[in-house]
Image (cartoon, helix red, strand yellow):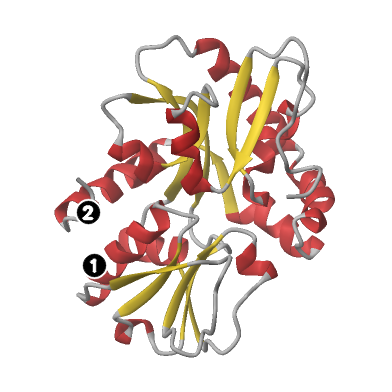
């Protein structure tokens, strides 16, 4: 992990520790927290954040919404900041060697919990197909010759796009087509029953500043994350959304409803 994405350390005055997604997509949410002397940021891939929160390594985390659902009796939404899309995401994508309706076996990127469930919901809703899910280790990918379809998330969709796959499905775009609703991938969650008003204000103010400065953030941080500059600008200023709206809440509820209906969420 490079110098600018590893954990920020401040020897004194830290009162809040936040677990953040280590991809470019979270930069507008925490760019203006980085230099705040009250704040320590702990970056990780999305799937690792629930463990950090459980171990007390952070006060609040930018959790995949599936991890909230699985722990909803003890977690609460802290802020209206989020990582969402109202259509194409650019970085949550299934790469396939055959048309989507013929895909039955999906290798999945273990960095995400939400996208794995979302892919299964979409294939059942759109194609009537129950996908066989096979874990795929990005650190030891091996040969892709025997992989018919692969779900990838995050920066590596842009920086390490696999070769030899003639078909692609952006899951944000597919969800919008199937439901007419936006999709929230991650949001700020903390322990239920605690007072989070100060943190909520801090996170919302940082998000507002980050949204307003998204193009500069994209031009600066895009190359750090391996992105072409113009693609990073499109990603942070047009593709992604960072504020939970009523339609996004409706999208979240519909996703949870379908996940339960299909036996994919407890």
| Label at residue 125 | 1
Does 59 appear above or below 81?
above
In the rendered image, residue 217, in percent from the top left (x then y), is placed at: 78, 44
Query: Dot 1: what SS?
Result: helix
Residue 44 shows up from this direction: yes
The residue positioned 77% from the left and 21% from the top of the image is: 10
N-terminal label among 1 and 2: 1
As measured in the structure, the alpha-carbon distance from the residue carrying label 1 to the one carrying label 2 is: 9 Å
The label number, if any, that marks residue 196 in the structure image: none
Q: Answer yes or no: do the residues labelled 1 and 2 have beta carbons within 8 Å? A: yes
Q: Helix, strand or loop at disc 2? A: helix
Per the image, the residue denoted by label 2 is 258
- Relative to 90, say whether 148 is above or below: below
Task: Using the image, determine if residue 227 lies above or below residue 56.
Answer: below
Residue 192 image offset from top left, x and y in percent = 35, 19
Query: In terms of depth relative to the viewer, which is nearer, 246 or 49?
Result: 49
Count the marks: 2
Whether residue 181 sits left or right of residue 10 in the image: it is left
């Amino acid at each position: 992990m490079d110098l600018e994405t590893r954990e920020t350390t401040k020897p004194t005055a830290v009162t809040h520790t936040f677990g953040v997604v280590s991809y470019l997509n979270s930069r507008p949410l925490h760019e203006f927290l980085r230099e705040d002397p009250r704040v320590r940021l702990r970056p990780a891939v999305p799937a690792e954040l629930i463990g950090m929160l459980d171990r007390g390594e952070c006060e609040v985390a930018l959790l995949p919404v599936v991890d909230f659902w699985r722990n909803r009796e003890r977690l609460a939404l802290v802020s209206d900041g989020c990582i969402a899309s109202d259509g194409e995401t650019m970085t949550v994508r299934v790469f396939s060697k055959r048309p989507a309706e013929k895909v039955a076996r999906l290798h999945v990127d273990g960095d995400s919990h939400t996208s794995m469930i979302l892919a299964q919901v979409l294939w059942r809703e759109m194609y009537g197909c129950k996908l066989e899910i096979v874990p795929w280790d990005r650190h030891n990918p091996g040969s892709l010759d025997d992989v018919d379809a692969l779900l990838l998330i995050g920066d590596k969709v842009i920086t390490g796009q696999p070769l030899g796959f003639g078909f692609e499905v952006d899951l944000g775009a597919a969800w919008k087509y199937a439901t007419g609703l936006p999709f929230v991938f991650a949001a700020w969650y903390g322990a239920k029953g605690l007072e989070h008003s100060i943190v909520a204000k801090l996170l919302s103010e940082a998000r507002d500043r980050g949204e307003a400065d998204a193009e500069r953030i994209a031009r600066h941080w895009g190359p750090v994350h391996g992105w072409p500059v113009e693609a990073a600008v499109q990603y942070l200023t047009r593709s992604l959304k960072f504020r939970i709206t009523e339609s996004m809440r409706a999208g979240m509820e519909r996703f949870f409803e379908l996940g339960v209906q299909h036996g994919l969420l407890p």
